[in-house]
Image: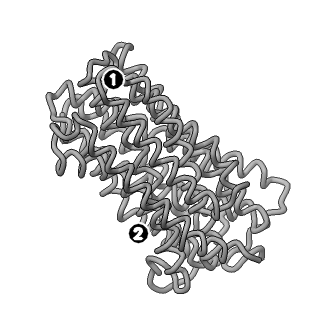
Amino acid sequence: MSQAGTSYDETSPDTPRHLRRLTLALAMVAFSTQSPSPILLFYTRELGLSATKLTVFFTVYAAGLLPALLLGGPFSDRRGRRTVVVPVVALCVLAQLALLSAAVAGEAGLYVGRVLQGLTSGAVFTVGTVWMRELAGPSRGSAAAMRAGAAMAVGFAFGPLVSGTLVQWAPAPKLLGFVVPILLLGVAFWLVRGLPETMTQHRSGRLQIGVPPGAGRAFGWYLLPAGLLVYTYAVLGLTIFPLQIARAGFGAPIFLTGVCALLVQGCAALATGPARRLGPVTSGWLAALLSATGAGLGYLAVQPGGWVWLIPSSLLIGVGEGLALTAGVIVCDLVAPPTRRGGLLSAFYIVVYAGFTVPTLLSVTAGQAALDTGVPILVLGAVALVLTLVLAGPGRTVALHATSP
């Protein structure tokens, strides 16, 4: 056995092919998950919905993620990675069809689709990341975690760009934006069906949910602040930034949403390599500092005529996302026992995806008048500075302990 609870031989000559297949599948599921973002902006205008409603579509996605993250990883610890990922990838198609039904069902179809997307993608991303790590083996676990994060970031980048381009300028915007992700999900299902199980020793008993014993300090001082950095700032580019820039006079906000996603998630994917070389000791506080700076530039971007600042803002936020996500996954891998790895990663991802609720909180608590000034974005920048201090202090100590031989 290569590790506790598994009997998969990572030295098999088929391992590189298995890793490639899972990498492509994760990227395709990520593509399908974020491709609706510009379409939601389109529907916000088409159905006459408020800007707050657009942010709520992201919040209900996070609500759908919660049970998937709580149960998906621990269930896979018991019954296997393949057992979870293969059927759930197939269910991702149902989420796309529910969103497609919005052309007839209207707002209700969007809500149902986004909840289903949360339920399905949450399970695929958490369990798929652990599956990738176990396929690669203990000696290449960190590299595999980086690979999984990069694959998802690439999908997150190109999904909104492709759909944003189609919705902004192509005919049938209510249809074409969903055709590509549905086709890719079919390919992803075919890819994961051929992968071997790594958790072949099934265990009975109740699911072990949450942070395992001995990992509480690492979670509180490192995984919690690092997780908050991942999407709290990245999702601004899919909601607050394009909405406010459109209000300031920019004429193609739907396409801008896709470009912003490409910049943020493209940089996140590129940052996974440097994150592994820097290690979690440095990557954590650096991610927070970059996020704070990106938020400051985002404040300039939403001012009248300031949209050009969105480019450097997106670049910095994207690098911060990639550093924080990769470092967090590495720390999870280091501090969790193999039989609880899925559970700890799920707990980390709950924090990560809580970032999707931030635009709604800003919209509801601050109000449109305050958002027009950009001040709430500066407040988020100040929060990132506080997280910088946490990750440069006790968080760094935790990371040093986790990475020491």
Q: Residue at x 71, y 63 (%)?
A: 141
The answer to which of 385 and 73 lies nearer the viewer is: 385
Residue bearing the label numbered 1:
253
Binning the other alpha carbons within 10 Å of mark 2 as few (below 14), some (14 to 19) or many (20 upward) gives many
Label 2 to label 1: alpha-carbon separation = 35 Å
Residue 288 image offset from top left, x and y in percent: 50, 54
Q: Which mark is residue 5?
A: none
- Identify the residue at horizontal 36%, vertical 24% (top origin): 306
- Residue 358 vs residue 198: left or right? left
* Residue 397 visible to the viewer: yes
Classify mark 1: helix, strand or loop.
helix
The answer to whether 291 appears left or right of 148 in the picture is left
- As drawn, the label of residue 70 is 2
User: As rendered, which of 362 and 35 lies closer to the eye?
Assistant: 362
Q: Residue 67, located in which quarter of the rendered image?
A: bottom left
Residue 390: give x, y in percent of width and height.
Answer: 48, 67
From the viewer's perspective, is residue 347 above or below residue 122?
below
**Side of 105 relative to 34 (left or right):** left
Residue 267 in picture, x, y percent from top left: 58, 38
Kindly tell me whether residue 189 is visible in this rendering: no
What's under tag 1, amino acid-wise? Pro
Please state which amino acid type lies under the numbered disc 2. Answer: Leu
Report helix, strand or loop for mark 2. helix
> Which colouring convention does the figure follow?
one colour
